[in-house]
Image (cartoon, helix red, strand yellow):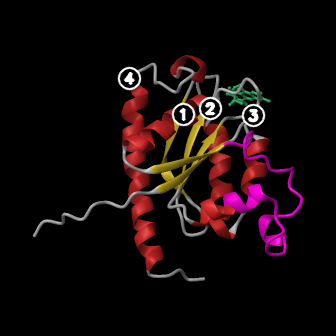
Amino acid sequence: MTDTATPPRLTIPVLLGSVRQDRKGIRAARLLMAALEARGHEPVLVDPLEDQLPLLDRMYKEYPAGTAAAVMEKLAALYRRADGFLIVSGEYNHGIPPALKNMLDHFLEEYFWRPSAIACYSAGRFGGVRAAMQLRMTLAELGMPSIPSLFTVPEIGSALAEDGTALNDRLPRQLGRFLDEFFWYCRALKAERAGGTPY
Ligand SMILES: Cc1cc2nc3c(=O)[nH]c(=O)nc-3n(C[C@H](O)[C@H](O)[C@H](O)COP(=O)(O)O)c2cc1C
């Protein structure tokens, strides 16, 4: 018998890690948002310029119920219904951009039992992979371990147009495989979460 079940529509927050006024990362975020939509899923852009969080004082969970800022409540609600997190990271001095780390550190349990995937980029030829390696450690600690593949965008200024259009052939090919892998993990953990979590 053939399995004709429709794959679930996945809710995927796309976390962009730059607040620079000249930021290039928005191009990668736009590419990913369009690709997720084209594959029938629900991407939600989390832009630290729009969803402004303070430099970390209290984590979301440290606020008594109903007293956290509206933006924190909004993100917590989004993360709780998420099936996976797509992290869009540049590389600042071989490390994680501070806006991204700050945004991530505000939450914890809301991420648990979901996979993450890293899209990294840079102005140079390494595509932000040094930051991505550090990011893997943080994402694992946050309870959203990252999938094996990275989506890397070297020389982002000439690789992506302002609207996120890929300007070379390699990126769309790489992106298709990366998303196949990510969706597989999203579906697998979604099915497993439906049966409960260890804690
Ligand atoms: C503070 C700072 C540090 C940077 N460090 C690196 C680096 O270590 N490696 C690298 O490849 N590019 C580095 N760059 C260049 C970035 O890759 C490039 O500016 C990129 O567009 C930054 O992402 P954003 O524009 O989305 O903020 C750095 C840029 C800034 C602003």
Q: Splitting the image into 4 quarters, where does residue 137 fall?
A: bottom right
The label nearer to you, 4 versus 1, is 1
139 relative position to 161: left or right = right
Q: Residues within 10 Å of mark 1 (few under 14, many from 20)?
A: many
The Cα atoms of the two marked residues, 2 and 1, are separated by 6 Å
Residue lying at 73% horizontally and 47% vertically, measured from the top left: 51
Kindly state the secondary structure of the residue where label 1 is placed: helix
The residue that appears at 48% across and 51% down in the rendered structure is 148
Ligand 1 within 8 Å of disc 2? The answer is yes
Say left or right for 101 vs 82. Answer: right
The numbered mark at residue 26 is: 2
- The picture places residue 15, in percent across and down from the top left corner, at 63, 46
Say which amino acid is labelled 1: Arg
**In this rendering, which labeled residue sits more in front, label 3 or label 2?**
2
What residue is pinned by disc 4? Answer: 169
Q: Which residue appears farthest toward the top when viewing the image? A: 158
Question: Does the magenta stretch mainly form a helix, a strand or a loop?
Answer: loop
Q: CA distance from mark 3 to mark 2?
A: 16 Å
Please give the residue where the numbered disc 1 appears in the rendered image: 30
- Magenta residues, as a range? 47-75
- Earlier in the chain: of badge 3 and badge 2, it is 2
Q: CA distance from mark 2 to mark 4?
A: 20 Å
